[in-house]
Image: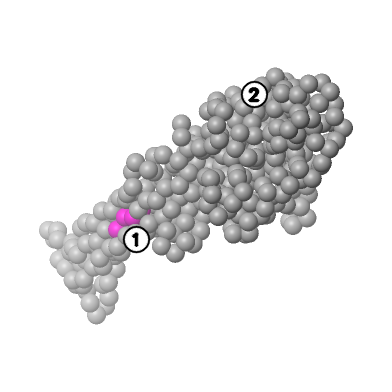
Amino acid sequence: MKIIDIARIEIESGSGGNGCISFRREKYVPKGGPNGGDGGKGGDVIFKATSSLSTLIDLNYQKKYKAGRGKHGQGGNKNGKNGKNCIIKVPCGSVIKNYETGEIIAELLKDGEEIVILKGGRGGRGNTHFKSSTNRTPRYAEKGELGKRMIVEVELKLIADIGLVGFPNAGKSTLISRISSAKPKIADYPFTTLSPNLGIVKSPDYDTTGFSFVVADIPGIIEGASQGKGLGVKFLKHIERTKVLVFLFDVSLLVTEKGKISDDKSILEKHYKVLEKELIAYSENTFTKLFKKPKLICITKIDILNNTQKKKLQTIYPEVICISAVKGENLDKLILEMQKTLLSENKDNKEKNNQHT
């Protein structure tokens, strides 16, 4: 399913019911007095996060949501029924903004988390509230408060533990298809991935530890993406919440025209700087700190190299993980390194949270 990650909808809370003007009229009860009931409260508009959704596609089909109106009060001190709440379900990781002002109203991250965005109108009071010693037959009741209307923009930022970052055709889709059950589109041309993919990766010792994590495959980035080139940076929002970034580079970038592995380590550093520059440009625009996240460097597609070239590659870049997703070479090593870095980051975050509390 294509991930719809942004939607604009109109929401409206319910108006309150009117209060009732009524007097008690019974045989043998002279001057019974006022008994008009109150109007019911209008329904609220509530956004609720659910893990059963992964896209905003439903909001693309239905553009207007309205809560129920409160019922009017009745005689005999009968209050009107409250209006039905309008509950809008969104995926975990959704950000709700006021479209007209750009203000962020809420972020829903956990399953079951909910927030009232628009409260329903208050019900009007019946005439029984206005009786007094000087006004025993009040012929006045309040009207219900009108509901509120707003246009909101819902933006989905996927919640993943690890984000795969790289140039087009760096092997991100092939990698996520081999280490998880995700089935992204794979082809030998740039920008094959047009929307993010998520995959759940199990650690090699999953049977004993039960540890797994979520990996996000982000569409390829090119130089100038922060200025809108290529697919731009519209998908980089999906790695804002990732804890670890894995940079993937095609080994062909390091092979000379004569078919040898270049001894110039600045080549890889230059390509890394291009990606980092785009991340920093994006993160500065949205006040995030993407470039401060823990990072792993990975060289892909080493299946095109012979054993001599592989040894030389590992000698020049001992700190880099070299893999072949097609042949499955060193994938366990990469998964273990992802797991180790992720666990370390989780521990650091936990310690920081404990210090703050």
Identify the disc placed on residue 178: 2
Q: Single out the residue that lies furthest toward the left.
A: 27
Say which amino acid is labelled 1.
Answer: Lys
Q: Decide whether the magenta segment is chiefly helix, strand or loop.
A: loop
Say which amino acid is labelled 2.
Answer: Arg
Locate residue 302: give its quadrant.
top right
**Left or right: residue 119 compared with residue 164:** left
**Left or right: residue 353 compared with residue 26:** right
Q: Single out the residue that lies furthest toward the right.
A: 315
Q: Which of 5 and 165 is in front in this view?
A: 165
Front tag of 1 and 2: 2
Is residue 332 among what the camera can see?
A: no
Image marks 1 and 2: residues in contact by CB distance under 8 Å: no
* Kind of element beneath mark 1: loop
Residue identified by numbered label 1:
148
**Left or right: residue 16 compared with residue 223:** left
Locate residue 249: give its quadrant.
top right
| Residue 251 x %, y % | 72, 32
Q: Is residue 13 magenta?
A: yes
| Residue 93 x %, y % | 55, 45
Q: Is residue 198 magenta?
A: no
Q: What stretch is highlighted in magenta?
A: 11-15
